[in-house]
């Protein structure tokens, strides 16, 4: 197994992203999103090589996080659909876990507020969008997650609905680990049976 931080801050693109996140420079919302996407594309060859060798990859963030954080800014010209467009063609994960934690719990755990996106209003919208991506279209409509800038309007999100599951991260380490394994186990069994993972799927 290989653990990978897909946002690689060691590359020239990654260094620009790092400066932005630390508020050292300002960038247009579209520009920084495309830099994040380019940084993910920089990782594709390494990801494909690892997968071809039979290595399981565990990423602490991937394109879902990228599109949600950009859309959470609620820029009228940067919808979730717009943000997703440059991600098409990336290797598609077998499973995505969103560790759900409310703002008060997140703040209590420390390390909060050190970077640009660690602001209450952004985190609230990010949480709503992740929940929305994990739902079917009718549920999104019922929850009011399809309207406004950055919403889930005008697009089909079937891949994300299939891949994304929400895990309550409010418990103890042991409780969260057990909940995660409960979600992961089924996918692992599918891979072991040869029903998943025979080839690398791509984001469409």
Image: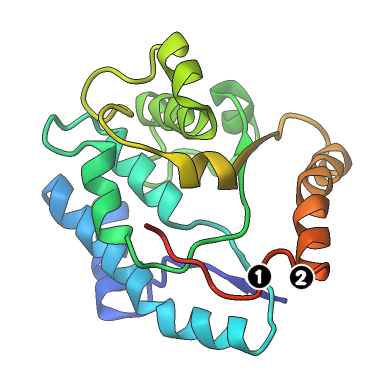
Image x and y of residue 188, in percent: 79, 61
For label 2, the residue is 194
Q: Is residue 26 left or right of residue 108?
A: left
Q: Quadrant of residue 100?
A: top right
Q: Residue at x 43, y 45 (%)?
A: 114
Quarter of the figure with the N terminus = bottom right
Inspect this view and state whether residue 39 appears: yes
Give x and y (percent) for residue 150.
26, 30
Residue at screen point 65% across, 75% down: 198
Kindly indicate whether the residue at mark 2 contacts the one at mark 1 (C-beta within 8 angstroms): yes
Q: Residue at horizontal 44%, vertical 65%?
A: 202
Q: Quadrant of the C terminus?
A: bottom left
Q: Which label was assigned to residue 197?
A: 1
Q: Nearer the viewer, residue 57 or 101?
A: 57
Circle count: 2
Picture coordinates of residue 179, whole percent (x, y): 81, 39
Q: Is residue 184 found left or right of 145 in the rendered image?
A: right
Residue found 21% across the figure and 45% down from its top: 82
Left or right: residue 123 compared with residue 32? right
Q: Residues within 10 Å of mark 1 (few under 14, many from 20)?
A: some
């Amino acid at each position: 197994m290989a653990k990978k931080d897909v946002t690689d801050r060691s590359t020239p693109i990654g260094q620009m992203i790092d400066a932005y996140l630390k508020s050292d420079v300002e960038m247009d919302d579209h520009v920084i999103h495309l830099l994040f996407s380019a940084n993910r594309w920089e990782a594709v060859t390494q990801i494909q090589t690892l997968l071809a060798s039979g290595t399981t990859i565990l990423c602490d963030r991937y394109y879902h996080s990228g599109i949600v954080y950009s859309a959470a800014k609620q820029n009228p010209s940067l919808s979730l659909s717009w943000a997703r467009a440059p991600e098409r063609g990336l290797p598609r994960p077998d499973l995505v876990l969103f560790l759900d934690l409310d703002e008060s719990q997140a703040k209590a755990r420390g390390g909060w507020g050190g970077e640009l996106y660690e602001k209450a209003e952004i985190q609230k919208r990010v949480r709503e969008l992740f929940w929305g991506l994990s739902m079917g279209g009718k549920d999104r409509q019922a929850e009011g997650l399809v309207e406004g800038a950055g919403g889930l309007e005008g697009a089909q999100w079937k891949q994300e609905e299939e891949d994304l599951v929400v895990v309550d991260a409010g418990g103890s380490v042991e409780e969260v680990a057990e909940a995660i394994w409960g979600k992961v186990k089924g996918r692992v069994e599918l891979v072991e049976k040869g029903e998943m993972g025979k080839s690398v799927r791509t984001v469409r």
